[in-house]
Image (cartoon, grey):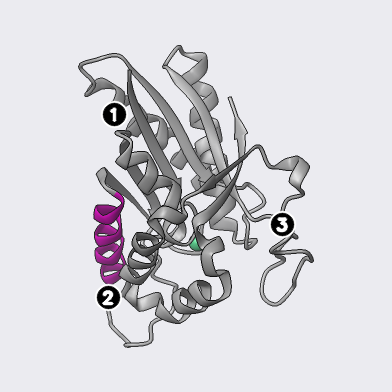
Amino acid sequence: MKQLLLGIFAHPDDEAFGPSGTLVLETRNGTELHLATLTCGEAGQNPDNVENLGDVRLGEWQAAAQLMGAATTHHLGYRDGTLSNTSLVEIQDRIVAIIRDIAACQTEQFALELMTLDDNGITGHIDHTVASRAATYAFHRLKNEGLPLTRIRYICAPREQFPTPTTDWLFMPAGREPTEIDEIVDAREVLDTIHDIVRCHHSQRQDGEAHVARMGDAIAVNHFIVRS
Ligand SMILES: [Zn+2]
């Protein structure tokens, strides 16, 4: 049966820094990957002082999506850092519409899974939580309507890497305990591709290089909370 996966994230580099290894393995195993970002990340770092950071970041996202083997990309056009309960209500309906469109294009039997961010926001960013909640809403609503949605995987940070909460910027919770983690994907065989994907986000290179250096091989080991 054809396997489809829709990844729903808030910022253009969320999947690159998070589950990109898992996504590369998925597409190499034949899964048809679709990606959605709620914002173009225009509030991110801008070391080259470009006027149109959002456009630059969308270009970086497209290049990264190509390396991940994505079939389609969907930019929802919300402003970075402004997502709220009001926008959530609209976003969740738009995610539902995207999934319906993807399903309508299928000519054979398929199964569709969603992937998103842990709803604790991982870093605590409210945009991450909105992406997670919108994905969760779409999953349950469409599953109840009979669409073949198999599961939703939430990329999360493990406690061993983030043992304590921080208040450096937003409140960032500690990582998830081992008992909270349902699946670990080891994508170290595609480590070089993961580095290339992170480095597509050239405008965010300060974060990207720090992430690569800090994580080592662990950048390729993804932890998920899984719900079906
Ligand atoms: Zn983000």
Q: Is residue 166 left or right of residue 29?
A: right
Q: Tell me the residue at 48%/76% (across/down).
A: 207
> Up-down: is 29 above or below 112?
below
Badge 3 crowding class, 10 Å Cα cut-off, few under 14, some 14 to 19, many 20 or more, is many
Image spot of residue 102 (x, y percent): 28, 29
> Which residue is denoted by mark 2 in the rendering?
52
> Up-down: is 144 above or below 163?
above
State the residue in front, 119 or 216. Answer: 216
Q: Report the amino acid beneath label 1.
A: Ile
Q: Which residues are magenta?
A: 54-68
Which structural element holds mark 2? Answer: loop
Image spot of residue 180 (x, y percent): 74, 41
Quadrant in which the N terminus is drawn = top left
Res 60 visible: yes
Q: Is residue 137 left or right of residue 23?
A: right
> Which residue is denoted by mark 3 in the rendering?
175
> Up-down: is 196 above or below 143?
below
Q: Which label's residue is closer to the chain start, 2 or 1?
A: 2
Residue ranking furthest to the bottom: 48
Residue ranking furthest to the front: 189
Which structural element holds mark 1? Answer: helix
Q: Which one is closest to the eye, mark 3 or mark 1?
A: 3
Q: Tell me the residue at 72%/66% (across/down).
A: 171
Badge 1 crowding class, 10 Å Cα cut-off, few under 14, some 14 to 19, many 20 or more, is some
Image spot of residue 194 (x, y percent): 39, 61
> Which residue is denoted by mark 1 in the rendering?
102
Quadrant in which the C terminus is drawn = top right
